Amino acid sequence: MFKKLILFFVLILITCLVGYWAKDLFFSLSSAHRATMITILGSIIAVCFTHSFTKSREIQSRHFGKKTEAYETIFEIVFDQLQKAKMHSGGTKKDQAKQLLSIIEAKKKIMIWGSPKVIQRFNEMETASILQDSKNASFYCFGKLFEEIRRDLGHNDTSLKDGELMSLIILPEDKDKVKEQFRIQKDKRQLQA
């Protein structure tokens, strides 16, 4: 950290010195040469910005397929758990071992391809599931994880209300109850912050 700070100040000092020298050089040139110099500098800045932006988009494009695969694994695990919960069945030991392997595989993929926010939301969801403070808190964390996954994949869900995404996977008669629980959980989290 200290080395980065020193390097930062050295770069600022060098930039100031070069800028002072360039200012003197710039004003000693004729107006035609100044216009040429401004055009060249503008072109260089535009090329650098475009290259940086293109490189960033290229990296995002390469990661998109892997992220999608990792996130699909998470969705499959969650939906399997919900289906077993609805059927009031924990499954056989073989099923539980298979599910544990699936969770480990999903964690590996998230560690590599998940955004920082998705990783944080996954940890919150897992903690809520382990602590089992309440089904509502756990459900809320699942919902926030799904929202973050969708955001990371490029979806704009700002028009969705809290709990609306998760209400897709519950029974119609429970939708209002879930939305109310989302509001309560959101209020609790805001009070804690």
Image (tube, grey):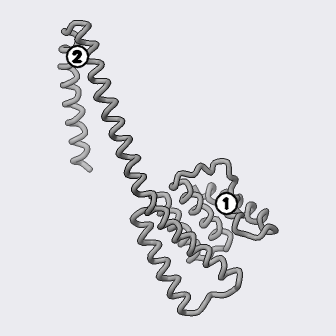
Q: Is residue 127 left or right of residue 12?
A: right
Residue, disc 2? 23
Farthest-out residue, top: 30
Sooner in the amino-acid sequence: mark 1 or mark 2: 2
* Residue 173 position in % (x across, y down): 82, 68
Give the CA distance from mark 1 to mark 2.
Answer: 57 Å
Q: Nearer the viewer, mark 1 or mark 2?
A: 1
Residue, disc 1? 165
Q: Above or below — where is 88 with respect to 188?
A: below
Q: Between residues 6 and 94, which one lies in front from this camera angle?
A: 94
Give the image quarter of residue 44.
top left
The number of numbered badges drawn on the structure is 2
* Residue 79 position in % (x across, y down): 62, 74
Q: Is residue 29 left or right of residue 86?
A: left
Q: Is residue 12 left or right of residue 179?
A: left
Residue at (66, 87) in percent of width and height = 89
Residue at (69, 68) in percent of width and height = 169
Q: Amino acid at mark 2?
A: Lys
* Residue 101 position in % (x across, y down): 47, 82
Residue at (54, 72) in percent of width and height = 127
Pointer 1 local density, CA inside 10 Å: few below 14, some 14–19, many at least 20: some
Give the image quarter of residue 167.
bottom right
Image quarter of the C terminus: bottom right
Q: Between residues 102 and 186, which one lies in front from this camera angle?
A: 102
Q: Amino acid at mark 1?
A: Leu
* Residue 115 position in % (x across, y down): 45, 58
